[in-house]
Image: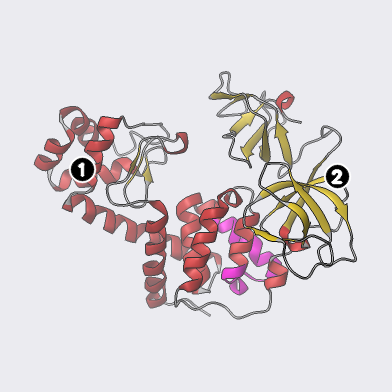
């Protein structure tokens, strides 16, 4: 079933409202967003990724006299006279004074108009990218658009395709499936709160969804539970927590992603695994198999080998921008539960880690700092 141009417009309208609610308003300026330089405007276009400066140049060129008055000579000159890629892959951080001036420019009539036009064009691309991947559910496409806005085209495509593999066709992926796999994704699963808000907003929309009976398949990835053992470290992706393996009613519900230890198993029970959070997220009890993703490293020993996707403990030390960098990008003297997202065995800092517990590890680390 092909998605029509009229349907794309409907999805863009719904997705736009959802994305704006998650990001900011016209005058929003994040001076240093996630250590990637400033992000600006209602969609938080970022400097490092090459989006902020071209938008500001469009606004400046629409009314140069007003822009110079609002920005002052130095900031105006930097924006007006730089090449469009001048901030690309550079951490152009805004000072407090610059943030106030940029906010005023972004909130002007020219600023709002430029943002509206760019946002509509961007979100249309996001939705069309989802269509190219094979998604036909309009609800899933709206969710896909927010994934791409937050995590980039690689994340949205990866999640849609993984969900499609589980249900034997991307065209069968609906809102439930794409949301389930977003939560289970090693990168986007870190943003469980936003994922949940977007899911609820899309679910409440009048957009059409696919009709299939694949939900159970989608929430049970193939790497879950068949070989789990007591002592394994796993990822709890959210759901009910029960006082026993046969309890009918939840003792509590935790909609957070948590790194947990398997402390008991009863494969005959409806809730076969007893988990305890290792990151303070409060999971303590029996859970459903479909609330668990992947076996990680075992409890007792340091891993003899590390694979992409493993959960490990970063014990503190340098974090680098590449596996061969000579100097630290930053130093984090905290113990953090991390996901291995890339490996370069030939690198000086062979493992790329991302914190699963909010401790701020995001980069390449030394093997000696991983347990």
Residue 131 makes an appearance in the image = no
Identify the magenta region.
156-176
**Alpha carbon of mark 2 to alpha carbon of mark 1: how far?**
55 Å
Image coordinates of residue 307 in percent, x first then y, are 75, 40
Query: First in sequence: mark 2 or mark 1?
Result: 1
Whether 319 is among the magenta residues is no
Mark 1 neighbour class, 10 Å CA radius: few under 14, some 14 to 19, many 20 or more? some
Residue 11 makes an appearance in the image = yes
Whether 173 is among the magenta residues is yes
Q: Nearer the viewer, residue 187 or 205?
A: 205
In the image, what residue occupies the spot 62% across and 74% down?
172
Work out whether 344 lies above or below 183: above
Residue for badge 2: 231
In the image, what residue occupies the spot 23% across and 54% down?
112
Horizontal side of residue 80 vs 234, given as left or right: left
Mark 2 neighbour class, 10 Å CA radius: few under 14, some 14 to 19, many 20 or more? some
Residue for badge 1: 104
Quadrant showing the C terminus? top right
């Amino acid at each position: 079933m092909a998605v029509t141009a009229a349907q794309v417009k409907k999805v863009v309208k719904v997705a736009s409202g959802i994305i704006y609610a998650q990001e900011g308003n016209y005058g929003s300026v994040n001076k240093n967003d996630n250590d990637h330089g400033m992000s600006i405007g209602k969609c938080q276009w970022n400097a490092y990724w090459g989006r902020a400066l071209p938008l500001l140049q469009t606004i400046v060129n629409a009314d140069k006299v007003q822009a110079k008055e609002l920005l002052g000579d130095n900031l105006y000159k930097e924006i007006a006279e730089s090449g469009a890629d001048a901030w690309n892959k550079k951490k152009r951080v805004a000072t407090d004074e610059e943030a106030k001036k940029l906010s005023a420019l972004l909130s002007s009539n020219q600023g709002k108009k430029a943002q509206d036009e760019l946002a509509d064009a961007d979100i249309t691309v996001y939705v069309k990218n989802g269509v190219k991947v094979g998604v036909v559910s309009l609800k899933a496409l709206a969710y896909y658009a927010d994934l791409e806005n937050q995590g980039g085209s690689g994340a949205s495509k990866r999640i849609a395709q993984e969900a499609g593999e589980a249900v034997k066709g991307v065209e069968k992926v609906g809102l439930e499936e794409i949301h389930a796999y977003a939560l289970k994704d090693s990168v986007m699963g870190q943003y469980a709160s936003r994922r949940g808000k977007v899911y609820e907003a899309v679910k409440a929309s009048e957009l059409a969804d696919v009709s299939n009976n694949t939900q159970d398949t989608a929430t049970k990835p193939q790497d879950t539970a068949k070989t789990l053992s007591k002592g394994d470290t796993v990822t709890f992706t959210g759901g009910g927590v029960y006082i026993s393996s046969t309890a009918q009613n939840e003792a509590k519900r935790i909609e957070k992603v948590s790194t947990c230890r398997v402390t008991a198993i009863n494969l005959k029970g409806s809730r076969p695994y007893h988990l305890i959070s290792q990151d303070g997220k409060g999971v303590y009890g029996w859970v459903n198999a479909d609330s668990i993703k992947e076996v990680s490293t075992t409890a007792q020993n340091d891993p003899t080998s590390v694979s992409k996707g493993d959960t490990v403990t970063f014990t503190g030390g340098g974090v680098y921008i590449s596996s061969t960098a000579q100097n630290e990008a930053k130093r984090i003297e905290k113990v953090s539960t991390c996901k291995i997202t890339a490996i370069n065995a030939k690198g000086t800092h062979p493992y790329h880690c991302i914190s699963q517990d909010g401790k701020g590890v995001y980069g390449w680390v030394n093997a000696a700092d991983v347990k």
